Image (spheres, grey):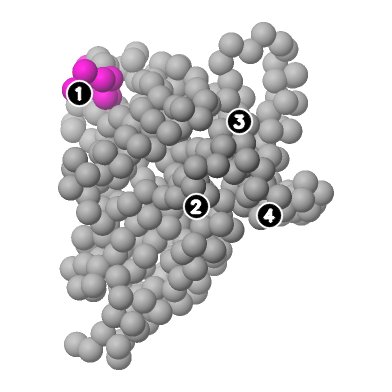
């Protein structure tokens, strides 16, 4: 079969591999043709006979709330997620020999000051992601972060730079959230995470919620800015997201692991291995009630259900 003669057909096959892992808040089956942005991007790579490049903003850092996570370094939740992404690329390679590559665009430094995580913890997390990828032989993955984009400038300088250059204005973002249900859902989801991730708060609950609502705008502004910078550096890539995305959006939401809802990620939870051998993501406090802690190489790794 000539790859150059059937790019749309091959792109459809590739997208069909992604569809079962689509991160969404609905459960209605949707055909590949409902995702024209992704089909066009994949088809362009296929026409060139080139490896398909995916960009995935995410894997920022661990939540600062010790009731949710095992520490500030990657653990079994990240390892399982990285393995899933690499396996997805190998599955693509079976139907499209040039294969695929996922660039994990680690975004912790982009909004670390807004979520209360020290920059040194974010560096350690991103560095360890690279170590895990190398150690597990996941050669279809790589990590890209603000250090790759802007070098050794101070972290605050980098954040200011991308905010001023790429972020939407606060007024424009507020108007969008008022008018768009998907933007509102994202805003509420991030606000909820910020409330849950805040440890040691001494004020009232209502004051915490007000503060987190304000910070949520900043997180979204910075996330948009990071997305624009990624497009600048990886213009042709197929854009993935760890957040639910509406049908037909420029980004395709992908679920990394089984979780109770469409918003849970490995960096907001701990991995729990069920008695049947399957995995799910659960806040650390809940996982500890259901099983025993397992260590790996002297570090907390996951929980094994009792």
- How far is the residue under mark 4 from the one under mark 3? 18 Å
Q: Which mark is residue 149?
A: 2
Residue on which disc 4 sits: 165
Which quadrant of the figure has residue 11?
bottom left
Kindly identify the residue that appears in the image at 71 percent across and 11 percent down: 203
Element class at badge 3: helix
Q: Secondary structure at mark 4?
A: helix
Q: In what quadrant of the picture does the C terminus appear?
A: top left
Q: Residue furthest top?
A: 202
In the rendered image, the vertical position of residue 142 relative to residue 9, given as above or below: above
Residue 230 in sight here:
yes
Q: Which mark is residue 113?
A: 3
**Which tag is nearer the camera, tag 2 or tag 3?**
2
Q: Say whether disc 4 or disc 3 marks the residue closer to the N-terminus.
A: 3
- Residue 54 drawn above or below residue 216: below
Magenta segment includes 156: no
Tell me where the magenta segment starts and ends, as one range. 294-306
Q: Does residue 9 appear left or right of residue 35 in this picture? A: left
| Residue at image coords 18%, 33% | 277
Q: Are marks 1 and 3 in contact (CB under 8 Å)?
A: no
Q: Would you say the residues marked 4 and 3 are in contact, meaning their CB atoms lie under 8 Å apart?
A: no
Is there a contact, CB below 8 Å, between mark 2 and mark 1?
no
- The location of residue 211, given as percent across then percent down, is 72, 26
Q: Secondary structure at mark 2?
A: helix
Pointer 2 local density, CA inside 10 Å: few below 14, some 14–19, many at least 20: few
């Amino acid at each position: 079969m000539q790859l150059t003669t059937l790019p749309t057909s091959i792109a459809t096959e590739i997208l069909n591999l992604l569809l079962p892992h689509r991160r969404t808040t609905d459960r209605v089956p949707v055909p590949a043709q409902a995702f024209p942005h992704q089909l066009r991007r994949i088809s362009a790579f296929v026409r060139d006979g080139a490896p398909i490049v995916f960009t995935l903003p995410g894997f920022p850092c661990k939540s600062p709330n010790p009731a949710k996570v095992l520490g500030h370094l990657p653990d079994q939740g990240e390892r399982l997620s990285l393995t899933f992404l690499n396996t997805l690329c190998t599955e693509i390679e079976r139907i499209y020999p040039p294969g695929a590559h996922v660039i994990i665009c680690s975004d912790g430094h982009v909004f670390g000051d807004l979520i209360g995580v020290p920059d040194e913890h974010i560096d350690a997390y991103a560095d360890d992601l690279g170590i895990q990828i190398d150690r597990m032989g996941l050669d279809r993955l790589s990590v890209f972060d603000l250090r790759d984009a802007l070098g050794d400038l101070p972290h605050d300088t980098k954040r200011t730079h991308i905010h001023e250059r790429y972020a939407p204005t606060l007024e424009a973002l507020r108007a969008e959230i008022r008018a768009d249900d998907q933007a509102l859902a994202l805003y509420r989801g991030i606000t909820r995470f910020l409330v849950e991730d805040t440890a040691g708060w001494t004020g009232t609950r209502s004051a915490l919620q007000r503060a987190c609502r304000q910070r949520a705008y900043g997180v979204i502004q910075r996330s948009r800015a990071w997305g624009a910078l990624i497009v600048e550096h990886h213009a042709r890539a197929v854009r993935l997201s760890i957040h639910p995305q509406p049908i037909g959006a420029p980004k395709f939401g992908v679920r990394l692991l089984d979780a109770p809802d469409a918003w849970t990620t490995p960096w907001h939870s701990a991995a729990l291995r069920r008695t049947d051998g399957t995995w799910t993501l659960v806040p650390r406090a809940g996982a500890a009630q259901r099983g025993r802690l397992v260590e790996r190489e002297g570090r907390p790794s996951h929980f094994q259900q009792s």
